[in-house]
Amino acid sequence: MRATALTTLLPFLRWFPITGDKLRADLIAGITVALVLVPQSMAYAQLAGLPVVYGLYASTVPVIIASLWGSLPQLHTGPVAMLSLMSAAAVLPLAAMGSDDFIVLSVMLASMVGVLRLLLGLMRMGILVNFLSSPVIVGFTNAAALIIGLSQLSKLLNVPFPRTDNFVLDLWNVIEQLPQTHIPTLLFAVATFVIIIGARRVVPKIPGVLLAVVLTTILSWAIGFERNQTVHLSGIQNEEARLLAAEYGATRRAISWLGEQTADLNRRIRALDGADDQESFASRTLLEADLQLLMRELDQRKRANNGRQVKLHNLRFEHVATKDDQHLFFNKGLVPESVITDGHTWRISKVDAEGVTMMGGGAVVGSIPAGLPSFQVPEMRMDFFWTLLPSALVMALIGFMEATSISKAIAAQTRERVDTSKELVGQGLANVVGSFFSSFTVSGSFSRSAVAAKNGAKTGMFAIFSALGVMLVLLFLTPLLYHLPQAVLAVIVMMAVFGLINVRALIRAWKIERQEALVGVITFVATLAMAPQLANGILLGAGLAIVLFLLRTMKPRADILGLDAEGRLAGVSMNDVKPLGRNYSVVRFDGSLNFVNASRFEDLLLEARSKNPNARAVLVEGSGINDIDVSGEERLRDVIQTFRDNGVELYFSSLKSQVYDTFRRGRLFHMLDETHFIRTKSKALEFMEARFDGSEPLEPAKPVVGPKTPVLG
């Protein structure tokens, strides 16, 4: 096997031989990236609705695979904010967040995204990303960044974030809870922000994210920031609160049962797909009706429980520990005078089968399972496959678009060559192989790739070093992360995504082309309105962009020409000029002449004829016609014949070679002689002036069949 073929199959062979200088540079870059990767991956795992350890899992094997089979050495793959939120949004309607089913479906989704990217890469279909215009991407990115960042607001305030199918209403519920803000949690968030910003200015060589994690974790441990107590329902000394908590727990169990029933009905409905007998059709109709009823009831119960969750959290309690080691919680201000409280304010954090979890402090990461992810074949639940497929396809394209833009930005600095199809293969393999090690969807990270490039990464070995660093954390350091405040992770996410907001790009697009900018604005609004289903927003934007493109293709720029004050040809509709010629007209058509816009071309010629009834000829200035299809050629022949029947001849100038060759292969030269095709615009105008407006018109030329080249000009 030749060396080129071998490096195509195993692209990481290009790294070798690795010199000592390169290895040292990669080691330093890898360690630096790992220090950023650990807290980021934990934050993005929570954004995906998963326990933080799954972020660490996604930062091991997928990182190594992507670096080995990727195209750009400095691109770092792993958990990213946008795909994490899209993963959560795709899986949330199918399973309760954080549940075992939710984890299984998240890993399954990663596998699907990986397979789709791998297929697109092997078929060299990276060109598909071109269907997403720049304003659509900017509009979607801005909306997604806002959604991701604002979804972390509840963690900064330490209040519930009830999730429904309407992100805006959910966010409003959080804003309404502003008076219930847990001040110590908010102070940790502010401190994190100050540390990260301050580190950039004071000690830029030390990652501010790492510094914030270390300092806040130590402080959280020192002050006992977490203060939880799980008690039986009877431990709450308030009947109204007990009833509310009991209703919440019962409804939560009912929601779980309804979720199982809807999944079962979906399976039974799909089993009847393809059956065309009357009995199967009737059964499917009944099952679909039952499914609609269950979905309506499920939605009602979720909304009711969201309200109960907020009410429970807004209650305030004081804690009393009795001599026989019982824990009682009284409404704040209603504690009997004979007992002594611990002086803290407590809230109801969670209600489940184990009891009621009371929170007297702030939320921390908590216990993280130690050890590396084990090899496990991802569970493929085919009853959810078709439901997840649209989201998987959009995530595959969005992730590829993100990785490609990052790669090109870095390649412009490093002068590396980026092969988008190879990058698709690397990203696809990373997700597929990663799903066998409990990874959720990963993609290229702009922040970590920028850190790698800034710290002198030379080969993909730096990413392997960063993955090894995460493995060391999983093996030995997880207990040290127990007291890391959740608010710190929320700030890390917010600062990462708010940097993606780019309003100037939309303003610039508005100045250049308002229709395209309007599509970007619609994409932005639609993505916000349809959140958390982000895929719907960008699909709508892409659809509008394609429709706009088709409309432009159907109505290309076309105009009757005249001469301006400086003697240049100009369109009469856009300029204050008169049409050329007394006995002839000149028109320009800027676009391919095909089945979509052939009628537009015919309308232009008819308009030129109607505006100059004395015209005996129409000259088509054809430098803007790039190609012509069968429909366009047939319509053109019809027009030539119609005009000729009315005593009007059609001429062409400045045709491109491919258009002229199409005319020659068709029947057009059976209708026109060679004088009707003039090579240059200036010669064509001289000819038209002399023949039709001059005192001595030229004699009509004899028809010649199939000339090879134009004679005039």
Image: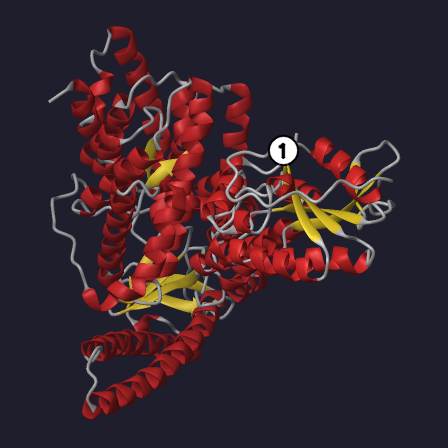
Of 446 and 34, the residue lying toward us:
446
Could you tell me which residue is drawn at 31 percent across and 34 percent down? 423
* Furthest-top residue in this view: 20
- Amino acid found under the numbered disc labelled 1: Arg
Callout 1 crowding tier (Cα within 10 Å): few <14, some 14–19, many ≥20: many
Q: Is residue 497 visible?
A: yes
Please identify the quarter of the rendering in which residue 172 is found: bottom right
Q: Is residue 369 visible?
A: no
Could you tell me which residue is drawn at 40 percent across and 30 percent down? 407
Image: 550 above or below 454: below
Q: Which residue is mark 1?
A: 679
- Left or right side of 150 for 695: right
- Left or right side of 543 for 645: right
Could you tell me which residue is drawn at 52 percent across and 67 percent down? 333
Of 296 and 251, the residue lying toward us:
296
Q: Quadrant of the C terminus?
A: top right
Of 222 and 196, the residue lying toward us:
196
Q: Where residue 597 sits in the image (x, y, percent)?
A: 58, 57
Could you tell me which residue is drawn at 65 percent across and 32 percent down? 712
Please identify the quarter of the rendering in which residue 258 is found: bottom left
- Left or right side of 439 for 334: right
Q: Where residue 274 sits in the image (x, y, percent)?
A: 21, 78
Colour mode? secondary structure
Q: Quadrant of the N terminus?
A: top left
Q: Where residue 158 sits in the image (x, y, percent)?
A: 47, 54
